[in-house]
Amino acid sequence: MSYQKHKSEESVEDYLETILILGRQLANVRSIDIANELNYSKPSVSVAMKNLRQKNYITVSGDGFIRLTDTGRSLAEAVYERHSLLSEWLIRLGVNPETAVADACRMEHDMSPESFEAIKKYLKDPSQTGLC
């Protein structure tokens, strides 16, 4: 079974992760905040927000404030966990932090759940894997 995701799925995950992160920094997240953070055009973000609403990942208030639904938050948190753990792991291995973050962003989308859980388990307790 292939775990490589289609680019549109990666885009959804990136948007949700960005909304999650911005939501921790700002009282209210708007499309312009997402556009600025990702360096995307406002029209591109607008189309993406429509798509995320249709998939029930976000809600948008009358004031334009974007909130993650429970489903959207669950997916965003899973992506953020993969990104954070992989970034930290690569940095601990000696990879330049900027490179580690960029590589983690690519890896987070294409890694199987099995491989991610194995890395997570290893990082928590290397002696449990028999590799050390």
Image (cartoon, rainbow, N blue to C red):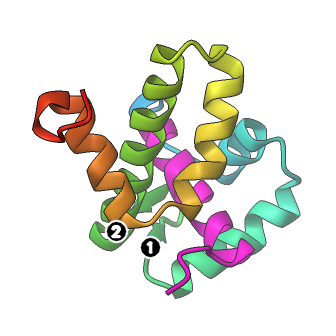
Name the chief secondary structure element in magenta: helix
Quadrant hosting residue 81: top left
Say which of 27 and 82 sits in front: 82
Q: Secondary structure at mark 2?
A: loop
Dot 1 amino acid type: Tyr
Q: Residue at x 77, y 38 (%)?
A: 36
Q: Is residue 100 above or below residue 78?
A: above
Question: Quarter holding the C terminus?
Answer: top left
Residue topped by disc 1 = 57
Q: Which mark is residue 69?
A: 2
Query: What amino acid does circle 2 point to?
Result: Thr
Residue at screen point 76% across, 61% down: 45
Magenta residues span 1-23
Nearer to us in this view, 105 or 46: 105
Residue 105, given in percent of the width and then of the height, sits at: 62, 44
Secondary structure state at the residue bearing disc 1? loop
Is label 2 in contact with label 1 (beta carbons under 8 Å)? yes
Q: What x and y, as percent, mark residue 89?
A: 44, 27
Which residue is pictured at 66% across the width and 50% down the height? 106
Image height check: is 69 above or below 129?
Answer: below
